[in-house]
Image (cartoon, grey):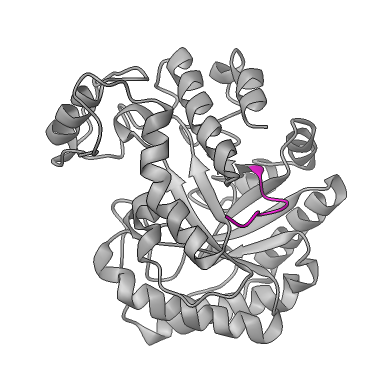
């Protein structure tokens, strides 16, 4: 599988320019330059910056200069400290992955799609000069399979437009089911050599999202550790999510560990090898309600597998957002996680 240089070990800056109240206090103060310096000191080589469209462009297509200036500031901070950066369009006009928002016309509306293309045209014009350390991520987490045919047409058109200006900048694309690792195989080429295939991994969600208040079917009192037996995972997935995970080669009493990650990554790795492209895990992490020792074991197992196949990654997330890497609860295990991430 092709190597992705400069994007091996990263962290998300979630909740700063995305999924927030968009107040000036939030935009000005949630992340500071010293945070970028700290990220570099920990041995990370890049950050992923989620951006909601309303930071930079209005619903009528008018550009918001302040938003672009804010993105430019982060790029320059990264340049100063020797970090690469993924510029991720987290939400676009007419579409959000967040429960309660969802799809509201993006996949069928030419107007919304034109604004999406305009956003990326502007990003290419303004920030293409930094292409040696910047990667564009077209859209975060397409949800439903039914959107895939439209999404394929949209990402192909977006790539075509960007390539007219920037023939070699890295462009990141993901598939559906919230950018599931299982659906990378459904992405449609052909792809040029500077495309990167993306997935997110919070598996098994029973562990990483236990007591997640935003998941409608997740009981507020459900608690589990990691690792667990496959039989438990299968039964509880049926009870909570209404679907039972089925893994060939696993028996009921088998413990879910690195073999589990090997199994779920298999088709994505094969797809990346087929296209001779890099593979990138743009989000992964454990909710702050999970047992801390189990959290360390989960990170150790997923890092073991990501390292084995040379898959770049950015953990979710630097601060707060229910998964904060700098939160106090992580103090005891943070150094151990950093060690396994190298």
Expressed as whole percent of the image width and height from the top left, the position of residue 275 reads 51, 67
Expressed as whole percent of the image width and height from the top left, the position of residue 241 reads 18, 39
Can residue 6 be seen in this snapshot? yes
Expressed as whole percent of the image width and height from the top left, the position of residue 161 reads 59, 85
Whether residue 3 appears in magenta in the rendering, the answer is: yes
Can residue 106 be seen in this snapshot? no
Residue at 75%, 67% (x, y): give it.
131
- Please identify the quarter of the rendering in which residue 126 is found: bottom right
Residue at 57%, 37% (x, y): give it.
308
- Please identify the quarter of the rendering in which residue 240 is found: top left
Side (left or right) of 70 relative to 298: right
| Viewer-nearest residue: 98 or 304 | 304
Side (left or right) of 258 relative to 143: right
Residue at 32%, 55% (x, y): give it.
177
Give the magenta-colored segment's residue range: 1-9
Q: How many marks?
A: 0
């Amino acid at each position: 599988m092709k190597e992705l240089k400069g994007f091996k070990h990263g962290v998300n800056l979630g909740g700063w320019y995305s999924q927030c109240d968009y107040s000036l206090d939030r935009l000005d103060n949630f992340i500071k330059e010293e945070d970028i310096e700290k990220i570099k000191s920990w041995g990370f080589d890049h950050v992923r910056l989620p951006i909601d469209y309303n930071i930079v462009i209005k619903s009528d297509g008018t550009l918001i200069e302040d938003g672009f200036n804010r993105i430019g500031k982060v790029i320059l901070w990264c340049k100063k400290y020797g970090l690469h950066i993924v510029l991720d369009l987290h939400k676009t006009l007419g579409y959000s992955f967040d429960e309660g928002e969802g799809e509201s016309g993006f996949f069928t509306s030419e107007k919304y799609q034109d604004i999406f293309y305009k956003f990326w045209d502007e990003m290419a014009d303004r920030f293409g000069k930094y292409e040696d350390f910047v990667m564009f991520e077209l859209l975060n987490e397409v949800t439903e399979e039914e959107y895939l045919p439209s999404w394929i047409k949209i990402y192909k058109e977006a790539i075509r437009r960007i390539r007219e200006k920037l023939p070699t900048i890295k462009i990141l694309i993901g598939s559906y089911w919230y950018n599931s690792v299982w659906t990378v195989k459904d992405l449609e080429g052909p792809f040029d050599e500077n495309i990167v295939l993306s997935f997110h991994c919070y598996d098994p969600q029973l562990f990483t999202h236990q007591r997640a208040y935003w998941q409608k079917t997740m009981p507020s009192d459900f608690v589990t550790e990691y690792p667990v037996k496959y039989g438990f995972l299968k039964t509880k997935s049926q009870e909570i999510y209404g679907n039972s995970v089925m893994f060939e080669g696993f028996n009921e009493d088998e413990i879910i560990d690195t073999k589990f990650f090997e199994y779920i990554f298999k088709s994505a790795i094969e797809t990346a090898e087929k296209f001779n492209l890099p593979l990138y895990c743009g989000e992964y992490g454990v909710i702050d309600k999970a047992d801390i020792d189990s959290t360390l074991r989960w990170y150790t197992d997923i890092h073991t597998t990501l390292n084995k196949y040379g898959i770049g990654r950015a953990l979710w997330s630097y601060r707060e957002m229910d998964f904060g890497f700098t939160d106090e609860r992580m103090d005891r295990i943070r150094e151990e996680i950093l060690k396994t991430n190298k």
